[in-house]
Amino acid sequence: MNELANAIPWLGKRNPAAARWVVIALALAAPLIAMLFGKSWVRILDFALLYVMLAIGLNLVVGFAGLLDLGYIAFYAVGAYTFAFLASPHFDLHLPFWLVLPLGAVFAALAGIILGLPTLRLRGDYLAIVTLGFGEIVRIFMNNLNHPVNITNGPQGINMIDPLVLFGWDISRPLKIGEEISVNSLFLYYYFFLACVVGSIIFVQRLQVSRVGRAWAAIRDDELAAKAIGINTRNMKLLAFALGATFGGVAGGLFAAFQGFVSPESFSLMESIAVLTMVVFGGMGNLAGVVVGALVLTALPEILSTWPYRCSRPCSDRCCWIRKCCGCCSCHWR
Amino acid sequence: METLLQQTVNGLVVGSVYALVALGYTMVYGILGLINFAHGDILMVGALVALEAIRLLQIYAPDLGLIPTLLAGLSVSVVVCMLLGFTIERTAYRRLRNAPRLAPLITAIGVSFLLQTIAMIIWGRNYHTFPQLVSTAPMEPLAGVFITPVQVTILVVSAVLMVALMLLVHKTRLGRAMRATAENHKVASLMGVDTNKIIAATFIIGSALAAVAGVMFSSNYGIAHYAMGFMPGLKAFTAAVLGGIGNLGGAVLGGLVLGLVESIGAGYIEDMSFGFLNSSYQDIFAFLILGIVLIFRPTGLLGERVADRA
């Protein structure tokens, strides 16, 4: 619970209980506030939560275990494409969400181990460039695996991905309460993502103070010494890669369901760097900081890109290159 | 067999461009331990500035002749890039010299975005045709291999520049100071080396090389674009790591190896994979070869083994 209070340091220091309630209230009321500025801002909030999940996952690898990963978005891509393959008309498979999302997570974790195994001996910048290369390789494959057998549908991406259906309840449709009130699906997604994020935060927080978390911290601070006191550095590093990738995979699956569309464009190196920036901006290894960093760095470009134009411009190129989904135009996700 | 020879020549040409850029990466890394992600974008600025200068020259001094025009454009872009490299070091990196390792890395990525965005505002998002002042028409085939004058020029110029750089680093006072700074900042400055000046000089030299590489790259492909620095930059960095980062000979070796593997691989991938993969997978070779080399030699081909310190 301390993490909650840490999110607003000036209040958290003096009155942790109040800070906690403020954070909870803000988290619950955020989409309502965003709605005042337009529906697109709720959408941005939804994306922000996905980025929070990514940042939490990357923080596990970079912040806790000290392994610099510049290809993190590849795991996001694995999750998203798994979802797209198994729940869309592309292969005419429509498996239930409860099966597809864990599968995405498992595949992402496997990808993490595949990346982790050969790179165990690498340090610092060497590791950074290999992970970067891994991310690029995954993207190049997504871009080109439409020939001669069409697997990923190439640069066009995969369309019409099934939305999230929880126990027969399709949350991509507005929820009708009684006759008049109808809750937009963006809100439903928001609260669902919020639940996922809260779950992740609790999990990671418990993990950080566990045996595993302490082992990671030891490896981060001094790998040789960690080995000397009997930590199995190989397994711990692989675990960091796999667990970090799992978060990426889950976020990717949610992204695919939410967006209904995936294409290699969304998984460029720039995205990896964006997530890394969120982690560094918030403070590596600090969970509350990472969450705040992800929220600020997702929202800020949107605010900056819509504000000077006042939404009077028609959708132009410029709108899109700053950030994927801008508030003023219909072109989203580049 | 002819395909192999042809792809070897192409690979050497591309590889020597990579090598020139990789030298800039590796020099900066050797001295500061910083991955200068903006280096690829200096290549882009070099190409675009040269393009602009050549355009202006062709308007205002049309009878200058092809080679003088190219040389003039090249000199302008080298000077601009030197200034740019100096400015970047001064404003962005110098303050972060004692910061945690990730801060300069992210800053370098930020500088890279900044340069791309500025170039995009100035030159727009379009692809520009780069005037091909050295002919790109293939000469008389030699043993069935077509080679163009521009490719010959690239090979010669980059070889001369590499030799010049080696001489500079190994035979001059400045070079000795650079090596001393790379070895140990503090001790070097105690010995009377002005490390700030040396680091600035490193950035200036690296940027000049990148500018030349940019002009050569654009002359070869006949195209310049605000985001053109990204891939060569990434490949050149890969080359630097492949050769053992911080090692000048390694950067050259890495660049050439990368260029060769990439172009030979692209020539044969279709046969090797029974038509399943095609040459659009060319880019994965750079990273695959990097991964494979680093598994067996974690510090690159020529990198020194650093002892673990607890």
Image (cartoon, grey):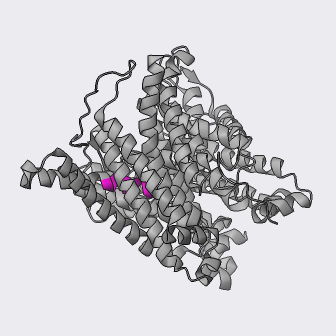
> Residue reaching furthest front?
B171
Name above or below for residue B291 compared with residue A20: above
Q: Quadrant of residue B286?
A: top right
In this rendering, does residue B302 appear at all? yes
Determine whether, in the image, residue B54 is placed left or right of residue B292: left
Name which residue lies at 49% across and 71% down: B174
Determine whether, in the image, residue A106 is placed left or right of residue B83: right
Name which residue lies at 45% across and 72% down: B200
> Residue reaching furthest bottom?
A14
Counting from the top left corner in percent of width and height, residue A71 is at 58, 47
Quadrant of the drawing holding the N terminus of chain A: bottom right
Counting from the top left corner in percent of width and height, residue B241 is at 59, 49
Quadrant of the drawing holding the C terminus of chain A: top left
Name which residue lies at 61% across and 82% down: B191
Highlighted magenta segment, given as a residue range: B39-46
Nearer to the camera, B178 or A133: B178
Instruction: Name the chief secondary structure element in magenta.
Output: helix
Q: Is residue B42 magenta?
A: yes
Q: Is residue A323 magenta?
A: no
Determine whether, in the image, residue A119 is placed left or right of residue B214: right
